[in-house]
Amino acid sequence: MAIEVSHLVKRYGEKTALNDVSFRIETGEIVGFLGPNGAGKSTTMNIIAGLRRPTSGSVQINGINMEEAPLEAKRQMSYLPEIPPLYLDMTVEEQLLFACELRGMTGKKGELLSYLEELCRRTDVAHVKNRLIRNLSKGYRQRIAVTQMLVGEPKILILDEPTVGLDPRQIREFRDLIGELAREHTIILSSHILPEISSVCRRVLVFERGRLIADGETATLQEKLTGRKSLQLTVAGEPERVELALRSIPGILSFTRVPTGEADAVSYQVDTSLEGDVRRELFGVLSRNQLPLLLLKPVEFSLERLYLQLTDEWAEESGQAPGEEASEV
Ligand code: ATP
């Protein structure tokens, strides 16, 4: 177990920023923390990284208790806060040598430099090692910050909103870099941007007003939530006949007519039970009724839909508007 978080509570005066948050992350997992601003993602990361103490609850990193052995626990990981900790007036090499010092790495300067050279090759920044950080683009600065995280070979990487302020190309390059690192590291990254999480993380933890409101693989989360899967369907024909055909198939739980771009055709979102696959039967029924099938495809799972659904459901249960700041909980 790489990270085990038990019953974390964090209060700032009257305000409860985290309310009984527990989860476990296995070695090698890449986990996304998702949630709107103020949901508690940074607070959780800060506590895991040992930078803030929880009001109550505990954190174990590779089995080491953060409260009992903070230095040993912190040695296992690297944390990248939202604003990368870089000295703009240092060159890349100076910054990384400084990181070696902070990590307590001893050795001759020459040895450290060749170690750093290898590290820079892994993150593709070797060609800028003599540049001042001030003169580098935001994308490169972020890569330097990640290179710095790797100094000392920690196996757990925690990144808080790592792509904020990057342009689309830089975001893609950054995702590729994370994908590379994921082969050898356990990674947590946070974002309030949904596609970012779904493109790199198999598992997602959804935070809302200091609580963990969902934890699981994106696909199973949806199934757990809705208990159904959906198909998108376009058929040439009159709606009455198509709907009669749809009603005759037991595996179809419900359907909703949606706008279609095709003349003389109708489109539906069809919800089916999780068990079985109605597509063959649907095709047969439509063709027997001489209703030509123009399109039939599973509705892609949308993390955005899940997220809105989760936060809405939670708001309904708690009587608060979604996104409203947690006050006294
Ligand atoms: P963001 O993306 O905005 O950083 P987040 O999900 O990371 O959001 P946190 O920064 O963890 O959220 O904040 C959780 C809650 O705790 C927020 O309501 C925030 O206002 C509050 N909070 C955070 N730090 C402090 C502090 N030092 N003093 C008082 N309240 C704080």
Image (tube, rainbow, N blue to C red):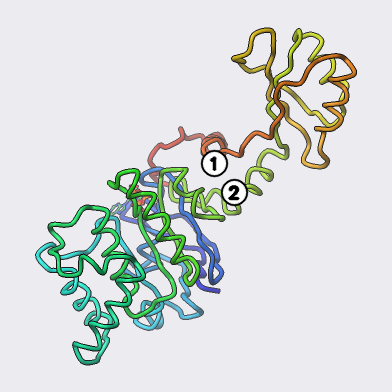
**Which residue is the site of mark 1?**
303
Query: Given the current orientation, which residue lies at the most extreme front position?
Result: 127
Instruction: Identify which residue, 111 or 272, lies in the foreground.
Output: 111
Instruction: Identify which residue, 123 or 50, lies in the foreground.
Output: 123
Q: Above or below — where is 10 with respect to 325? A: below
Q: Secondary structure at mark 1?
A: helix
Q: Which label is found at residue 218?
A: 2
At which x and y percent is residue 282?
83, 27
- Relative placement, left or right, of 82 versus 67 is left
- Relative placement, left or right, of 300 versus 186 is right
Q: Quadrant of residue 178?
A: bottom left
In the image, the residue with mark 2 has its CB under 8 Å from the nearest atom of ligand 1? no
Q: Amino acid at mark 2?
A: Thr
Q: Residues within 10 Å of mark 2 (few under 14, many from 20)?
A: many
At which x and y percent is residue 265?
69, 12
Q: CA distance from mark 2 to mark 1?
A: 7 Å
Q: Amino acid at mark 1?
A: Leu
Which circle's residue, 2 or 1, is located before the other in the chain? 2
Q: Residue at x 29, y 61 (%)?
A: 143
Q: Residue at x 31, y 54 (%)?
A: 13
Q: Residue at x 72, y 28 (%)?
A: 296
Q: Are marks 2 and 1 in contact (CB under 8 Å)?
A: yes
Query: Given the current orientation, which residue lies at the most extreme left position?
Result: 89
